[in-house]
Amino acid sequence: MKRLVSAIMIIGLIALSGCSGNKAPELFETAKFEELQNNREHAIQLYEEIVTKYPGSEFADKAKERLRELKRSEQK
């Protein structure tokens, strides 16, 4: 069941990614999903991509916050 939900979410994100020029929201949702799947490394890569490619977006600020949290929890 978990894999089915994961597959549906990924398919949905892929479908949405073609709908807009700004992919920051989709990248952010994918990064959050990766966190839920305990794939921190990929989540960090996606958050860093948001900060780099979409620095002026609201998602860049959200991504920076998630990066701080993830890096803070690594240090514990």
Image (spheres, grey):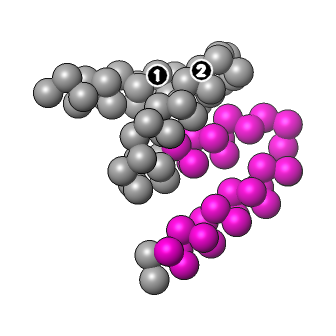
Q: Which residue is mark 2?
A: 51
Location of residue 56 in the rendering, given as x and y in whole percent from the top left corner: 67, 16
Residue type (three-letter) at the residue carrying disc 1:
Lys
Location of residue 15 in the rendering, given as x and y in whole percent from the top left corner: 79, 60
Q: Which residues are magenta?
A: 3-31
Quadrant in which the C terminus is drawn:
top left
- Viewed as shown, does residue 73 lie left or right of 7? left
Q: Quick check: 44 above or below 38?
A: above
Q: Quadrant of residue 10?
A: bottom right
The secondary element bearing badge 2 is classed as helix
The secondary element bearing badge 1 is classed as helix
Say if residue 25 shows up in the picture: yes
Q: Residue at x 53, y 68 (%)?
A: 6
Q: Which residue is mark 1?
A: 64
Say which of 72 and 56 sits in front: 72
User: Is 22 colored magenta in this rendering?
Assistant: yes
Location of residue 68 in the rendering, given as x and y in whole percent from the top left corner: 35, 22
